[in-house]
Image: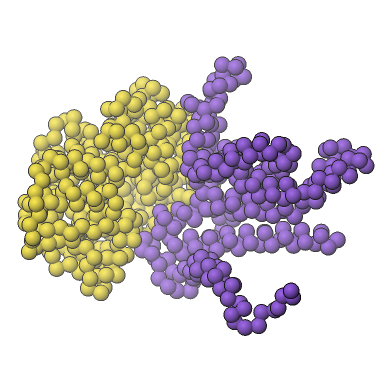
């Protein structure tokens, strides 16, 4: 049966539902945010409709530049660590028996049921001086006295990687399961070591999947707002924390909106750049 | 109520739980249909529910004025709503609970109907900080609830209580403090000014404010946690993880009474006293009823009861109240408090916020 190109309006009808969803849940809120970002702030009051660029001007400072840079670097670092851990793990998982796979996947799914709040407080207890894991190292003679492992960038990264890792594995899993095992077998037959086979065959074969996963984790980590507050110092607060401060505590919606628009644009640009670079390699 | 403190529920819920206690002392009564009524704005949620259940019926019984309570959002959104409604001649609430900063902002547009001191029986017994006045000394608001933020310590780590806010600056306390994360709720600029610069008047000028920021920046190496979430710090204080900081006096006292190794100290420079007012919107024609309401809430018996059961600091002079020394010191102190410079947060809030954020996160 030959597929006919759509001719009448009715042929486009199946598109209506996703289109409406996209408009209601993305286009309208995002447009509102863009509009508000140009409104005039009234100190203490909310805002009045206007067209001013003060909100963007305030953002363009060394301080907020630094915050934005830190947020992006943090999200990229989390994405790279997650994929670096999850890719080999998921590969080995797909080689395991079905039973083992199911147990692991159920465990990973159960981690997803934990909220960011629970993850944050659990790690803050684990890293504390009074009740944390260093208390176990003291009797073992590895440490002379227990110490706090937070607040710090290490604690923030641990919390964020812990939160994003199950997503990463679940995104990688279908692609790795479907990977044709004969590819590796061929490589091994031709004399490649298992390690060489993994990096020379499997990783390149799934390059697009890896890039897509990196982008997903990056975007996921970019919105993190609670973990940097609970586990980090103020210099580890992401742009999302500052946006919340402005929106909720300072009632400064226009400035918060301007920062949010900026964050969305920068991350879209980064994602676009990544796809562009990836696409070029494919052609070459 | 003590159980609630253990669970680390927010301050407002604690206040509300106390109000439930206040109401339980009263004999339940059936509301009659009233000719006179008053709409009162209180913070929405559990707080409003408890007022509805316990305080307002008693007020109605005593005065014959029916109360319709209105849930008001926290922050300054309610001020904006009242302002816009007043322009249209509407009053979403006649009397509202308003933060000091919002009270000052409302004054700029004459939003508050001036109150008549002659109609408030205990007007002369009110502490001066609980009378909010227009620049021409008309009365814009009367204190509704007040509380203290003090210097708190873990008694295991600090056998001797500190006697001054200067302890926050002590190099001995490196990485040991928990402080509130916002310029507008920590009031640390005022603390700095009172402790090192001779008083909060030194914040009158921008040089003074910058000098306070500079002095305050010296505290940074000592701060382990800048907290937004109260439960997070309270837990860390109790366990000794973060053994010193600023926190609510009444909540700390209750935690100590529950056996936790914590104490609240009024430093010699004074505790920080924050509060909210009752105000009457100009769009309201219930001026008479509003005065009856504010008069009722400012009676020594009601204020004493709220101190005992809710943990709020009384708005009246100590000698008018029948609180014992123990009851009084559980919620307040005779040491002159540090009163926040609310005027700064109306005129320079964005600038102060920016400087503050750059100071702590920079």
Using residue B216 as the reference point, say whether residue B43 is left or right of it: left
Instruction: Judge by depth and name the residue closer to the eye, B133 or B89.
Output: B89
Relative to A128, is B28 above or below? below
Chain A hue?
purple
Q: Quadrant of residue B305?
A: top left
> Residue shown at 66%/50% (left/top)?
A171
Using residue B131 as the reference point, say whether residue A231 is left or right of it: right
> Residue shown at 50%/30% (left/top)?
A128
Instruction: Judge by depth and name the residue closer to the eye, A79 or B324.
Output: A79
Horizontal and vertical percent for residue B263?
32, 29
Horizontal and vertical percent for residue B203?
36, 50
Q: Furthest-front residue in view?
A: A1
Horizontal and vertical percent for residue B176?
46, 31
Relative to B256, is B84 above or below? below
Q: Which chain is assigned yellow? A: B
Q: Indicate the quadrant containing the N terminus of chain B: top left, top right, bottom left or bottom right.
A: top left
- Tell me, yes or no, if residue B325 can be seen here: yes
Relative to B222, is B77 above or below? below
Instruction: Judge by depth and name the residue closer to the eye, B133 or A178.
Output: A178
Horizontal and vertical percent for residue A238?
55, 50
- Tell me, yes or no, if residue A73 can be seen here: no
Q: Furthest-bottom residue in view?
A: A8
> Residue shown at 41%/48% (left/top)?
B182
> Residue shown at 62%/41% (left/top)?
A105
Using residue A176 as the reference point, say whether residue B196 is left or right of it: left
Relative to B225, is A202 above or below? below
């Amino acid at each position: 049966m030959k597929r006919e190109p759509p001719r009448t309006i009715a042929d486009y009808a199946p598109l209506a539902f996703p289109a409406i969803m996209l408009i209601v849940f993305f286009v309208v809120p995002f447009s509102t945010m863009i509009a508000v970002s140009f409104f005039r702030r009234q100190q203490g009051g909310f805002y009045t409709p206007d067209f001013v660029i003060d909100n963007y001007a305030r953002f363009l400072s060394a301080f907020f530049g630094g915050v934005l840079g830190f947020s992006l670097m943090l999200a990229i670092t989390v994405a790279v660590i997650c994929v670096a851990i999850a890719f080999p793990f998921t590969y080995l998982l797909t080689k395991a028996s079905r039973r083992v796979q199911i147990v692991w996947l159920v465990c990973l799914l159960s981690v997803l049921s934990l909220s960011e709040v629970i993850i944050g407080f659990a790690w803050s207890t684990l890293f504390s001086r009074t009740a944390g894991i260093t208390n176990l190292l003291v009797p073992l003679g590895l440490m002379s006295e227990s110490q706090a492992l937070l607040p710090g960038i290490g604690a923030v990264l641990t919390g964020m990687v812990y939160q994003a890792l199950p997503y990463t594995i679940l995104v990688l899993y279908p692609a790795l399961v479907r990977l044709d095992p004969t590819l590796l077998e061929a490589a091994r037959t031709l004399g490649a070591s298992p390690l060489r086979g993994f990096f020379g065959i499997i990783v390149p074969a799934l390059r697009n999947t890896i890039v897509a996963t990196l982008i997903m984790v990056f975007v996921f980590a970019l919105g993190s707002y609670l973990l940097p507050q609970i586990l980090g110092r103020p210099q580890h607060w992401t742009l999302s924390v500052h946006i919340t401060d402005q929106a909720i505590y300072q009632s400064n919606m226009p400035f918060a909106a301007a920062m949010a628009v900026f964050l969305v644009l920068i991350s879209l640009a980064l994602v676009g750049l990544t796809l562009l670079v990836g696409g070029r390699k494919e052609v070459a | 109520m003590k159980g609630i403190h253990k669970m680390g529920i927010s301050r407002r819920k604690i206040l509300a739980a106390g109000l439930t206690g206040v109401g339980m002392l009263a004999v339940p009564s059936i509301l009659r249909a009233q000719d006179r009524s008053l709409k009162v704005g209180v913070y929405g949620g559990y707080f409003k529910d408890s007022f509805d259940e316990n305080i307002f019926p008693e007020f109605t019984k005593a005065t014959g004025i029916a109360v319709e309570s209105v849930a008001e959002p926290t922050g300054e959104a309610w001020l904006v709503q009242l302002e816009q409604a007043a322009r249209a001649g509407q009053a979403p609430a006649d009397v509202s609970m308003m933060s000091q900063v919002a009270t000052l902002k409302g004054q700029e547009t004459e939003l508050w109907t001036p109150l008549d001191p002659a109609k408030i029986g205990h007007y002369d017994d009110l502490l001066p900080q609980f009378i909010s006045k227009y620049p021409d000394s008309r009365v814009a608001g009367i204190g509704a609830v007040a509380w203290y933020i003090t210097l708190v310590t873990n008694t295991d780590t600090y056998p001797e209580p500190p006697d001054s806010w200067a302890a926050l600056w002590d190099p001995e306390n490196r990485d040991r403090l928990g402080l509130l994360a916002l310029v507008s709720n920590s009031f640390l600029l005022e603390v700095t000014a009172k402790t090192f610069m001779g008083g909060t008047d030194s914040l009158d000028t921008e040089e003074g404010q910058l000098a306070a920021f500079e002095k305050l920046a010296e505290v940074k190496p000592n701060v382990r946690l800048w907290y937004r979430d109260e439960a997070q710090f309270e837990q860390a204080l109790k366990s000794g993880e973060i053994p010193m900081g600023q926190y609510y006096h009444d909540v700390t006292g209750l935690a100590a009474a529950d056996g936790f190794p914590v104490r609240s100290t009024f430093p010699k420079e004074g505790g920080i006293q924050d509060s909210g007012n009752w105000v009457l919107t100009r769009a309201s024609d219930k001026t008479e009823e509003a005065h009856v309401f504010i008069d009722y809430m400012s009676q020594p018996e009601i204020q004493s009861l709220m101190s005992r059961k809710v943990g709020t600091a009384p708005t009246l002079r100590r000698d008018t109240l029948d609180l014992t020394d123990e009851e009084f010191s559980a919620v307040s102190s005779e040491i002159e408090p540090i009163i926040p410079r609310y005027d700064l947060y109306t005129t320079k809030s964005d600038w102060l916020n920016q400087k503050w954020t750059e100071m702590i996160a920079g």
